[in-house]
Every structure is written in C-alpha cells, then in structure tokens.
Amino acid sequence: MKKTLAYPLAAIALFVWGFLFWGLLAEPLGMVRVAADEGALGAQLSEALGEDGVYFLPAETSDDAAWVTRHTSGPLAMIHFRRAGADPRAPGPLLAGFLHILASAILIGWLVQAAPAGRGLGTVVLAALAAAVFANLGTPIWMYQSWWYHGLVAGYQFVGWLLAGTILAKMLPERS
C-alpha cells in the first residue's frame, strides 16, 4: 500500500510546488517581462508568422555572412508561436500535466528502487541536478537567453525533485 501511494503523493508534491512556483513566485522573481503593447505585438506576430512553430530571429540562411551580421547586430529572439488561443484554466492541460508529472515520478521511483540501500534520495538529488543543469543551462549559452530565467527554472526543477524524491525515498522499498 505504501508503495502504491508513493507515486501519486510525489506527483501531488510536484504539482503543488509547480502551482506555488509559477503561480506565486515567478512574477515577484522577475522571470517574465511584459511587452509595452502586447496587443500590437500579438497582431504583428500573427501577421508576420505563417504557421505554428518555433522561429529564430535572425533565421539562419545560406548567406552566412549576412546571417552573422544580423546575428551580431541583433535583436535575437526565439519565438514559440501558436496562432490559436487556449483557455489557461481548462481542465485538459491540468490533467495531462498531472499525468506527465505522475509518469515522471514513476520513473524517478524506479531510480530510487534501483539505488543501493540508503542511497535512494542521494541518487535522486544527483539525477535531478544533472537533469536541471542539462535541460536548462544550455539555453543561455546556445540561444543567448536569460541566465536569470533559466537558472530559476533549473532551481525550480531541482527543488521539485528534492521534494518528490524525499517522498519516494521514504516510501519505496530499498534494494537489498
């Protein structure tokens, strides 16, 4: 019974941590800026970008010298564009997000159980740190994005997995 509850409890801890971080802390931490005229920018993006996708500014072209000049003089942007809107409070993404978190908790739980006795939490801490560093800290290097933003996201992920890992390490049986 304890093992069965470990995964959903870890997922709930991650879900609540995500709500607290993104719902209450992200804005005071200055993670995201607001455009001066968001409506005009949205209209310009809808007009300039053809279809949903990821756009780089400047886009790399076959004229390498021109691309380097545009890249050097700026501006630089990576735009994740979706033309259609979406209800931010729709239950579908919340459910899908929770299932994603639960699947991740199950995978980390397997890692806890595979660790030598007494080393489950330490294994999760190292795995969480490696994943957060790899998944987030390359973007400021390669895409010239904000170190502040991606550093905070890495911290958010690390703390979340520290919380979930603690639950999993306490509740799952250790390898003998």
Image (cartoon, rainbow, N blue to C red):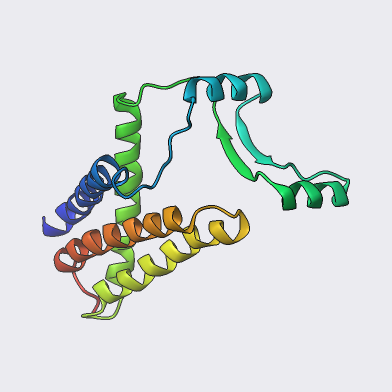
Residue 152, picture quadrant: bottom left
Residue shown at 30% from the left, 33% from the top: 94
Quadrant, the N terminus: bottom left
- Residue 23, percent across and down? 26, 40
When the figure is inspected, residue 68 is found, relative to residue 128, above or below; the finding is above
Any part of residue 83 in sight? no
> Number of marks in the image?
0
Query: 78 or 87: which is nearer to us?
Result: 78
Q: Indicate left or right for 160 with 44 as reference.
A: left
Any part of residue 42 in sight? yes
When the figure is inspected, residue 158 is found, relative to residue 26, above or below; the finding is below
- Residue 165, percent across and down? 24, 64
Residue shown at 58% from the left, 37% from the top: 79
When the figure is inspected, residue 108 is found, relative to residue 76, above or below; the finding is below
Query: 111 or 82: which is nearer to us?
Result: 82
Q: Indicate left or right for 149 with 160 as reference.
A: right
When the figure is inspected, residue 22 is found, relative to residue 158, above or below; the finding is above
- Residue 115, percent across and down? 31, 76
Query: 150 or 9: which is nearer to us?
Result: 150
- Residue 154, percent across and down? 39, 59
Quadrant, the C terminus: bottom left
Q: Indicate left or right for 139 with 24 as reference.
A: right
Q: Residue furthest left?
A: 1
Q: Indicate left or right for 14 with 137 as reference.
A: left
Residue shown at 35% from the left, 35% from the top: 96
